Image (cartoon, rainbow, N blue to C red):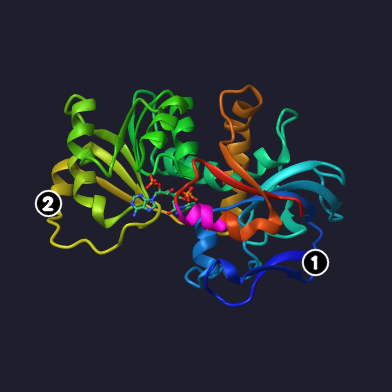
Amino acid sequence: MKAILIHQFGGIDQLYIGEHPKPVLNEYELLVKVEATALNRADILQRQGKYPPPKGASPILGLEMAGIVEEAGKNVTEWKAGDHVFALLPGGGYAEYAVIPQGMAMLIPDNMSFEEAAAIPEVFLTAYQALVWLGNVQPAYNVLIHAGASGVGTAAIQLVKYFQGTSLITAGSNEKLQFCCDLGASFAFNYKEEAFAEKVLQATKGGGVDIIIDFVGAPYWKQNISCLAVDGRIVVLATMGGSVIEKFDVRAMFIKRAQLLTSSLRSRNESYKIDLTQDFSQRILPGFADGKLKAVVDRIFNWQDVAEAHQYMEQNRNIGKIVLNGM
Ligand SMILES: NC(=O)c1ccc[n+]([C@@H]2O[C@H](COP(=O)([O-])OP(=O)(O)OC[C@H]3O[C@@H](n4cnc5c(N)ncnc54)[C@H](OP(=O)(O)O)[C@@H]3O)[C@@H](O)[C@H]2O)c1
Protein backbone atom coordinates (compact mmCIF):
# COMPACT_ATOMS: atom_id res chain seq x y z
CA MET A 1 0.00 0.00 0.00
CA LYS A 2 0.99 3.64 -0.22
CA ALA A 3 1.86 5.54 2.96
CA ILE A 4 3.55 8.75 4.01
CA LEU A 5 7.05 7.74 5.08
CA ILE A 6 10.15 9.53 6.39
CA HIS A 7 13.55 9.41 4.64
CA GLN A 8 15.43 10.36 7.82
CA PHE A 9 14.27 12.05 11.02
CA GLY A 10 14.23 15.79 10.43
CA GLY A 11 12.35 18.56 8.67
CA ILE A 12 9.26 18.57 6.47
CA ASP A 13 11.42 17.79 3.40
CA GLN A 14 11.91 14.27 4.80
CA LEU A 15 8.26 13.33 4.24
CA TYR A 16 7.36 11.38 1.09
CA ILE A 17 4.72 8.95 -0.20
CA GLY A 18 6.19 5.48 -0.69
CA GLU A 19 5.36 1.79 -0.47
CA HIS A 20 4.86 0.03 2.89
CA PRO A 21 3.45 -3.44 3.64
CA LYS A 22 -0.34 -3.45 4.06
CA PRO A 23 -1.23 -4.21 7.71
CA VAL A 24 -2.50 -7.74 8.44
CA LEU A 25 -5.57 -8.12 10.62
CA ASN A 26 -6.18 -10.78 13.28
CA GLU A 27 -9.56 -12.39 14.02
CA TYR A 28 -10.67 -9.56 16.35
CA GLU A 29 -9.61 -6.68 14.15
CA LEU A 30 -10.88 -4.58 11.24
CA LEU A 31 -8.96 -3.66 8.11
CA VAL A 32 -10.02 -0.13 7.21
CA LYS A 33 -9.50 1.73 3.92
CA VAL A 34 -8.44 5.14 5.23
CA GLU A 35 -10.36 8.05 3.69
CA ALA A 36 -8.99 10.80 5.96
CA THR A 37 -6.51 11.25 8.78
CA ALA A 38 -5.52 14.28 10.84
CA LEU A 39 -2.36 15.87 12.18
CA ASN A 40 -1.34 16.01 15.81
CA ARG A 41 1.54 17.83 17.43
CA ALA A 42 3.04 14.43 18.22
CA ASP A 43 3.46 13.77 14.47
CA ILE A 44 5.95 16.63 14.23
CA LEU A 45 7.97 15.29 17.15
CA GLN A 46 7.91 11.76 15.69
CA ARG A 47 9.05 13.09 12.29
CA GLN A 48 11.93 14.83 14.07
CA GLY A 49 12.92 11.60 15.86
CA LYS A 50 11.91 12.92 19.31
CA TYR A 51 8.84 10.75 19.91
CA PRO A 52 9.22 7.07 18.99
CA PRO A 53 5.99 5.06 18.57
CA PRO A 54 5.11 2.72 21.45
CA LYS A 55 6.29 -0.90 21.22
CA GLY A 56 4.31 -2.86 18.63
CA ALA A 57 2.74 0.22 17.00
CA SER A 58 3.07 1.03 13.31
CA PRO A 59 6.14 3.18 12.57
CA ILE A 60 3.99 5.25 10.17
CA LEU A 61 2.81 8.64 11.47
CA GLY A 62 -0.84 9.23 12.26
CA LEU A 63 -2.81 8.81 15.49
CA GLU A 64 -6.32 8.70 14.07
CA MET A 65 -8.29 7.98 10.93
CA ALA A 66 -11.73 7.68 9.39
CA GLY A 67 -12.59 5.22 6.64
CA ILE A 68 -14.53 2.22 5.35
CA VAL A 69 -14.22 -1.29 6.77
CA GLU A 70 -12.76 -3.44 4.00
CA GLU A 71 -12.55 -6.69 5.94
CA ALA A 72 -13.64 -7.85 9.41
CA GLY A 73 -11.73 -10.58 11.29
CA LYS A 74 -13.61 -13.87 11.68
CA ASN A 75 -14.41 -13.27 15.39
CA VAL A 76 -15.63 -9.69 14.88
CA THR A 77 -19.27 -9.46 15.89
CA GLU A 78 -20.20 -5.77 15.73
CA TRP A 79 -18.84 -4.60 12.38
CA LYS A 80 -18.93 -5.64 8.74
CA ALA A 81 -17.34 -4.67 5.43
CA GLY A 82 -18.72 -1.34 4.22
CA ASP A 83 -19.25 0.22 7.68
CA HIS A 84 -17.99 3.79 8.04
CA VAL A 85 -15.81 3.99 11.14
CA PHE A 86 -13.30 6.27 12.85
CA ALA A 87 -10.78 5.51 15.56
CA LEU A 88 -7.75 6.41 17.60
CA LEU A 89 -4.53 4.72 16.48
CA PRO A 90 -1.16 4.20 18.19
CA GLY A 91 0.34 5.03 14.76
CA GLY A 92 -0.28 4.26 11.10
CA GLY A 93 -2.96 6.78 10.10
CA TYR A 94 -0.97 8.37 7.24
CA ALA A 95 -1.59 5.35 5.00
CA GLU A 96 -4.08 3.79 2.60
CA TYR A 97 -5.00 1.09 5.14
CA ALA A 98 -5.04 0.75 8.92
CA VAL A 99 -5.95 -2.10 11.26
CA ILE A 100 -7.90 -1.50 14.48
CA PRO A 101 -9.28 -3.75 17.24
CA GLN A 102 -13.07 -3.99 16.91
CA GLY A 103 -13.53 -2.28 20.30
CA MET A 104 -11.72 0.85 19.10
CA ALA A 105 -14.05 1.50 16.18
CA MET A 106 -16.70 4.21 16.41
CA LEU A 107 -19.54 4.53 13.90
CA ILE A 108 -19.43 7.76 11.87
CA PRO A 109 -22.76 9.56 12.39
CA ASP A 110 -24.82 10.05 9.21
CA ASN A 111 -24.35 13.83 9.20
CA MET A 112 -20.53 13.67 9.42
CA SER A 113 -17.90 13.57 6.63
CA PHE A 114 -14.78 11.39 6.77
CA GLU A 115 -12.72 14.58 7.18
CA GLU A 116 -14.74 15.69 10.21
CA ALA A 117 -14.66 12.22 11.73
CA ALA A 118 -10.87 12.00 11.34
CA ALA A 119 -10.54 15.25 13.28
CA ILE A 120 -12.21 13.85 16.41
CA PRO A 121 -10.52 10.81 18.02
CA GLU A 122 -7.15 12.03 19.31
CA VAL A 123 -8.17 15.46 20.53
CA PHE A 124 -11.62 14.61 21.87
CA LEU A 125 -10.51 11.41 23.61
CA THR A 126 -7.54 13.27 25.12
CA ALA A 127 -9.74 16.14 26.30
CA TYR A 128 -12.42 13.72 27.56
CA GLN A 129 -9.89 11.67 29.48
CA ALA A 130 -8.32 14.81 30.99
CA LEU A 131 -11.58 16.52 31.94
CA VAL A 132 -13.78 13.59 32.92
CA TRP A 133 -11.63 10.61 33.89
CA LEU A 134 -8.82 12.63 35.49
CA GLY A 135 -10.35 16.03 36.24
CA ASN A 136 -13.80 14.78 37.35
CA VAL A 137 -15.42 17.84 35.75
CA GLN A 138 -18.74 18.85 37.30
CA PRO A 139 -21.44 21.36 36.34
CA ALA A 140 -20.45 24.83 37.58
CA TYR A 141 -16.73 24.04 37.52
CA ASN A 142 -14.40 26.71 36.22
CA VAL A 143 -11.84 25.16 33.87
CA LEU A 144 -8.74 26.91 32.52
CA ILE A 145 -7.62 25.52 29.15
CA HIS A 146 -4.24 26.61 27.85
CA ALA A 147 -3.53 26.57 24.07
CA GLY A 148 -7.30 27.02 23.75
CA ALA A 149 -7.26 27.13 19.94
CA SER A 150 -5.24 23.91 19.58
CA GLY A 151 -6.92 20.70 18.49
CA VAL A 152 -7.16 19.46 22.08
CA GLY A 153 -8.09 22.93 23.34
CA THR A 154 -11.03 23.33 20.95
CA ALA A 155 -12.30 19.88 21.98
CA ALA A 156 -11.90 20.73 25.68
CA ILE A 157 -13.83 24.02 25.38
CA GLN A 158 -16.78 22.16 23.85
CA LEU A 159 -16.69 19.37 26.43
CA VAL A 160 -16.63 21.80 29.36
CA LYS A 161 -19.75 23.43 27.93
CA TYR A 162 -21.30 19.99 27.35
CA PHE A 163 -20.81 19.27 31.07
CA GLN A 164 -22.24 22.72 31.96
CA GLY A 165 -18.99 24.13 33.25
CA THR A 166 -17.34 27.46 32.45
CA SER A 167 -14.15 27.58 30.43
CA LEU A 168 -11.42 30.19 30.47
CA ILE A 169 -8.70 29.92 27.85
CA THR A 170 -5.32 31.30 26.89
CA ALA A 171 -4.05 31.61 23.33
CA GLY A 172 -1.51 33.61 21.37
CA SER A 173 -3.57 35.81 19.02
CA ASN A 174 -6.76 37.83 19.18
CA GLU A 175 -8.21 35.81 16.28
CA LYS A 176 -7.73 32.64 18.35
CA LEU A 177 -9.28 34.26 21.44
CA GLN A 178 -12.37 35.26 19.45
CA PHE A 179 -12.70 31.80 17.93
CA CYS A 180 -12.54 30.17 21.36
CA CYS A 181 -15.22 32.53 22.72
CA ASP A 182 -17.46 31.75 19.74
CA LEU A 183 -16.96 28.07 20.51
CA GLY A 184 -18.08 28.48 24.12
CA ALA A 185 -15.25 29.89 26.24
CA SER A 186 -16.44 32.55 28.69
CA PHE A 187 -13.10 34.32 29.17
CA ALA A 188 -10.05 34.42 26.92
CA PHE A 189 -6.59 35.85 27.57
CA ASN A 190 -3.75 36.53 25.16
CA TYR A 191 -0.72 35.10 26.96
CA LYS A 192 1.60 37.12 24.73
CA GLU A 193 0.10 40.38 25.98
CA GLU A 194 -0.71 39.75 29.63
CA ALA A 195 -0.07 37.44 32.57
CA PHE A 196 -3.13 35.23 32.86
CA ALA A 197 -3.24 34.36 36.58
CA GLU A 198 -4.47 37.71 37.85
CA LYS A 199 -7.10 37.85 35.08
CA VAL A 200 -8.30 34.34 35.90
CA LEU A 201 -8.68 35.26 39.58
CA GLN A 202 -10.64 38.38 38.65
CA ALA A 203 -12.90 36.40 36.31
CA THR A 204 -13.60 33.81 39.01
CA LYS A 205 -14.16 36.48 41.70
CA GLY A 206 -11.06 35.34 43.55
CA GLY A 207 -12.07 31.69 43.73
CA GLY A 208 -9.76 30.37 41.03
CA VAL A 209 -10.31 27.47 38.64
CA ASP A 210 -11.20 23.91 39.58
CA ILE A 211 -9.28 22.27 36.71
CA ILE A 212 -6.37 23.45 34.58
CA ILE A 213 -5.59 21.63 31.33
CA ASP A 214 -1.97 22.51 30.63
CA PHE A 215 0.29 21.78 27.66
CA VAL A 216 2.86 24.49 28.31
CA GLY A 217 4.61 23.38 31.52
CA ALA A 218 7.39 25.32 33.22
CA PRO A 219 6.63 28.90 32.10
CA TYR A 220 3.04 28.59 33.35
CA TRP A 221 3.76 26.65 36.54
CA LYS A 222 3.67 29.41 39.14
CA GLN A 223 0.75 31.22 37.54
CA ASN A 224 -1.17 27.93 37.33
CA ILE A 225 -0.79 27.32 41.07
CA SER A 226 -1.69 30.89 41.94
CA CYS A 227 -4.99 30.86 40.01
CA LEU A 228 -6.01 27.31 41.04
CA ALA A 229 -8.98 26.91 43.40
CA VAL A 230 -8.56 25.09 46.71
CA ASP A 231 -8.73 21.33 45.98
CA GLY A 232 -8.17 22.10 42.29
CA ARG A 233 -6.54 19.74 39.80
CA ILE A 234 -3.87 20.48 37.23
CA VAL A 235 -3.75 18.01 34.34
CA VAL A 236 -0.45 18.32 32.48
CA LEU A 237 -0.58 16.84 28.98
CA ALA A 238 2.56 18.36 27.45
CA THR A 239 5.41 20.75 28.20
CA MET A 240 5.62 22.76 24.96
CA GLY A 241 7.20 25.72 26.76
CA GLY A 242 9.73 23.75 28.85
CA SER A 243 9.80 21.16 31.60
CA VAL A 244 12.29 22.40 34.23
CA ILE A 245 10.78 24.48 37.02
CA GLU A 246 13.37 26.44 38.94
CA LYS A 247 13.02 27.60 42.54
CA PHE A 248 9.47 26.49 43.14
CA ASP A 249 8.29 26.22 46.73
CA VAL A 250 5.98 23.20 46.82
CA ARG A 251 4.16 24.64 49.87
CA ALA A 252 2.24 26.79 47.38
CA MET A 253 0.56 23.54 46.34
CA PHE A 254 -0.16 22.41 49.93
CA ILE A 255 -1.95 25.68 50.64
CA LYS A 256 -4.34 24.87 47.78
CA ARG A 257 -4.41 21.10 48.49
CA ALA A 258 -3.62 21.01 44.76
CA GLN A 259 -3.62 17.73 42.82
CA LEU A 260 -1.16 17.31 39.99
CA LEU A 261 -2.11 14.77 37.31
CA THR A 262 -0.35 13.86 34.09
CA SER A 263 -1.22 11.57 31.22
CA SER A 264 0.01 10.38 27.87
CA LEU A 265 -2.78 8.74 25.89
CA ARG A 266 -0.60 7.15 23.23
CA SER A 267 1.35 5.07 25.73
CA ARG A 268 -1.78 3.62 27.38
CA ASN A 269 -2.44 -0.04 26.67
CA GLU A 270 -5.10 -1.28 24.26
CA SER A 271 -7.65 -2.26 26.90
CA TYR A 272 -7.49 1.23 28.47
CA LYS A 273 -8.04 2.82 25.05
CA ILE A 274 -10.95 0.48 24.31
CA ASP A 275 -12.59 1.36 27.65
CA LEU A 276 -12.07 5.07 26.97
CA THR A 277 -13.46 4.76 23.43
CA GLN A 278 -16.52 2.81 24.62
CA ASP A 279 -17.25 5.31 27.41
CA PHE A 280 -16.79 8.22 24.99
CA SER A 281 -19.02 6.55 22.39
CA GLN A 282 -21.86 6.15 24.87
CA ARG A 283 -21.65 9.48 26.67
CA ILE A 284 -20.30 11.92 24.09
CA LEU A 285 -20.83 10.66 20.52
CA PRO A 286 -24.58 11.42 20.57
CA GLY A 287 -23.60 15.07 21.10
CA PHE A 288 -22.11 15.14 17.57
CA ALA A 289 -25.23 13.67 16.02
CA ASP A 290 -27.48 16.26 17.68
CA GLY A 291 -25.20 19.22 16.88
CA LYS A 292 -24.07 20.10 20.43
CA LEU A 293 -20.49 19.13 19.57
CA LYS A 294 -18.57 19.51 16.32
CA ALA A 295 -15.25 18.66 14.76
CA VAL A 296 -13.25 21.86 14.38
CA VAL A 297 -11.50 21.49 11.02
CA ASP A 298 -9.23 24.38 10.11
CA ARG A 299 -7.84 23.13 6.79
CA ILE A 300 -7.94 20.01 4.65
CA PHE A 301 -4.81 19.17 2.68
CA ASN A 302 -4.44 16.46 0.05
CA TRP A 303 -2.01 13.95 1.57
CA GLN A 304 0.46 14.73 -1.23
CA ASP A 305 0.80 18.14 0.45
CA VAL A 306 1.65 16.67 3.86
CA ALA A 307 4.85 18.75 4.11
CA GLU A 308 2.83 21.96 3.76
CA ALA A 309 0.36 20.68 6.36
CA HIS A 310 3.17 19.96 8.85
CA GLN A 311 4.62 23.41 8.24
CA TYR A 312 1.23 25.01 8.85
CA MET A 313 1.05 23.30 12.26
CA GLU A 314 4.65 24.10 13.14
CA GLN A 315 3.91 27.77 12.49
CA ASN A 316 1.05 27.57 15.03
CA ARG A 317 -1.38 28.75 12.35
CA ASN A 318 -4.14 26.19 12.87
CA ILE A 319 -7.27 26.73 14.91
CA GLY A 320 -8.51 23.23 15.61
CA LYS A 321 -7.52 20.41 13.31
CA ILE A 322 -5.56 19.94 10.11
CA VAL A 323 -6.87 17.03 8.04
CA LEU A 324 -5.31 14.97 5.22
CA ASN A 325 -7.39 13.21 2.57
CA GLY A 326 -6.99 11.81 -0.92
CA MET A 327 -5.17 8.60 0.04
N1 LIG B 1 -0.68 13.83 26.85
C1 LIG B 1 -1.51 13.44 25.92
O1 LIG B 1 -2.14 12.38 26.00
C2 LIG B 1 -1.69 14.31 24.69
C3 LIG B 1 -2.55 13.90 23.66
C4 LIG B 1 -2.73 14.78 22.57
C5 LIG B 1 -2.04 15.97 22.51
N2 LIG B 1 -1.18 16.28 23.52
C6 LIG B 1 -0.45 17.56 23.49
O2 LIG B 1 -1.40 18.58 23.50
C7 LIG B 1 -0.86 19.74 22.88
C8 LIG B 1 -1.84 20.22 21.84
O3 LIG B 1 -1.84 19.28 20.77
P1 LIG B 1 -2.56 19.64 19.41
O4 LIG B 1 -2.26 18.58 18.42
O5 LIG B 1 -3.98 19.93 19.73
O6 LIG B 1 -1.78 20.99 19.06
P2 LIG B 1 -1.95 22.08 17.94
O7 LIG B 1 -3.31 22.00 17.34
O8 LIG B 1 -0.75 21.99 17.07
O9 LIG B 1 -1.88 23.44 18.77
C9 LIG B 1 -0.80 23.76 19.57
C10 LIG B 1 -0.88 25.26 19.93
O10 LIG B 1 -0.18 25.46 21.15
C11 LIG B 1 0.28 26.79 21.20
N3 LIG B 1 1.69 26.78 21.63
C12 LIG B 1 2.74 26.21 21.00
N4 LIG B 1 3.86 26.39 21.70
C13 LIG B 1 3.51 27.11 22.80
C14 LIG B 1 4.23 27.63 23.91
N5 LIG B 1 5.55 27.45 24.04
N6 LIG B 1 3.55 28.33 24.84
C15 LIG B 1 2.22 28.53 24.73
N7 LIG B 1 1.48 28.06 23.71
C16 LIG B 1 2.12 27.36 22.76
C17 LIG B 1 0.13 27.37 19.79
O11 LIG B 1 -0.99 28.25 19.79
P3 LIG B 1 -0.85 29.80 20.23
O12 LIG B 1 -0.90 30.59 18.94
O13 LIG B 1 -2.04 30.01 21.10
O14 LIG B 1 0.45 29.97 20.93
C18 LIG B 1 -0.18 26.15 18.94
O15 LIG B 1 -0.97 26.45 17.81
C19 LIG B 1 0.47 19.31 22.26
O16 LIG B 1 1.52 19.70 23.11
C20 LIG B 1 0.36 17.81 22.23
O17 LIG B 1 1.61 17.19 22.26
C21 LIG B 1 -1.00 15.50 24.59
**Circle 2 SS class:** helix
Residue drawn at 55 percent across, 60 percent down: 43
Q: Main secondary structure of the magenta part?
A: helix
Quadrant of residue 315 within the rendered picture: bottom left
In the visual, does 234 lie left or right of 125? Answer: left
Which span is picked out in magenta? 310-315
Secondary structure category for the residue under label 1: loop
- Residue at image position (27%, 44%) is 192
Circle 2 packing at 10 Å, graded few (<14), some (14-19), many (20+), is few
Q: Is residue 256 left or right of residue 149?
A: left
| Distance of label 1 from label 2 (alpha carbons) | 54 Å
Who's the residue at 17% across and 63% down the image?
246
Residue 325 magenta: no
Front residue (pair 241, 299): 299
Q: Position of residue 174 (x, y in %)?
A: 36, 35
Which callout, 1 or 2, points to the residue nearer the camera? 1
Q: Image height check: is 8 above or below 113?
A: below
Tag 1: amino acid: Lys
- The disc label shown at residue 22, or none: 1
Q: How many marks?
A: 2
Q: Is residue 113 left or right of residue 184?
A: right
Q: Could you say where residue 301 lies in the image, as x and y percent from the top left?
A: 65, 49
Quarter placement of the C terminus? bottom right
Amino acid type, mark 2: Arg
Which residue in the protein does label 2 denote? 251
